[in-house]
Amino acid sequence: MFRKFTKEDIHSRSKVKSSVQRNLKSKLVSQFPQLEEVIDELIQKKSQIELIKCEDKIQLYTVDGEVYFFQQFDELIPTLKLIHKYPQAFPTIQVDRGAIKFVLSGANIMCPGLTSPGARLPETPGYEKDSIIIINAENKEHALAVGKLLMSTDDIASINKGHGVEMIHHLGDPLWNFNID
Amino acid sequence: MLQEVVYCGVCTFPPEYCEFTGKLKRCKVWLKENHSDLYEKLYGDEEVGDKEVSGVAKNLADSSIGEEREEKLEKDLKRLQTKQENREQRELAKKLSSKVVIKREARTKRKFIVAISGLEVFEVDMKKLAKTFASKFATGCSVSKNAEKKDEVVIQGDVLEEVQKHIKGMLEEKGLKDVKMEIIDSAKKKKQPEGAEGAPATNGKK
């Protein structure tokens, strides 16, 4: 999604009202229920959320100068900055060491990279198709990408062919390097 | 409850991913200086014994993708690193060989503008620089295209020397010393009454 993303893609910046901020927080919690206990710490009451509208209807939300999440359609997607702070709250899958290189250059994740011995998929029932997941790597502590499942995790395990996860945001992409001022 | 994650100062990734960026050498130096505990954890065992061999062996031990693929990956990473290094060197060479042009031009009688060009190589944000100059010298300052269709910063007012100092300081902060600077002073200074053309001009004004 952020293959190309520069300052020119920004259309407007505006501060978010505190009422909208409350809504955003509750929406985040409803999407990722485990965020509830830390949400007040993540987005403190006094902090100022800014809304940055960009090309292709992408909207970034920054909290105190850092992009924490964004949305293109209805769904809020956390950025890696947020994920690194509280990774437990998000559904996670793991890729093997051989895949890291490709993930970091922005490739979609293929099923075999998710089913090999170094990788890890959740046990059944697993995650639904189209859900937002974070991608971790073998022997690594922190997440390296955010993606969207193109098929359910059960299907990934059974079919084991083709694209499994659509890349949304990864370490080193323009959004990661993006600096708001 | 929230985790604080250390990000590498060189490649901005969490340090465990430094090896995939091709800047590993510089990342290691940075990590050693700033977070020696993390450095120990990530690269500690490599220090002991033969560097190369133990590094590969360690990765192999806790990786599951098989010897062959691990070797290939290792090779790819090395190649990436050399590539990156070459690129950095090229960029540095380019930076050192290019020069900043600071030009002073006369507008009307006692008004001057100072135009700075050639900064784009150094990854300077022109707009921001213009803003700083505008507030620093309390004058108008903007970015515009010059005759060669390149961006330049135009400052209203006679601030040639100050600008020169500022830019020198700025480049040194980026670790670039001895960048060539070309000063073009197409307008004569009022201060120097001597000189072939300077004198009559000042006399004329009186």
Image (cartoon, coloured by chain):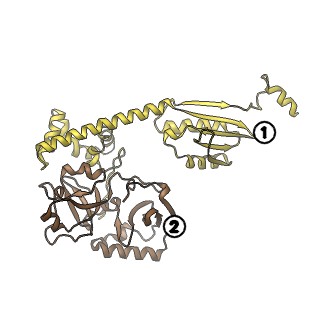
| Chain letter of the residue carrying label 2 | A
Q: Residue at x 80, y 38 (%)?
A: B109
Q: Which mark is residue B78?
A: none
**Circle 1 residue:** B110
Answer with the quarter of the image where residue B102 lies.
top right
The residue type indicated by label 1 comes to Arg
Distance between the alpha carbons at the discs numbered 1 and 2? 43 Å
- Does residue B54 appear left or right of residue B36 in this picture? left
The residue type indicated by label 2 comes to Ser
- Does residue B123 appear left or right of residue B116 in this picture? left
| Chain letter of the residue carrying label 1 | B
Q: Are marks 1 and 2 in contact (CB under 8 Å)?
A: no
**Circle 2 residue:** A14
Answer with the quarter of the image where residue B195 lies.
top right
Q: Residue A115: x percent and y percent?
A: 14, 59
- Does residue A162 appear left or right of residue A170 in this picture? left
What is the drawing colour of chain B? Answer: yellow
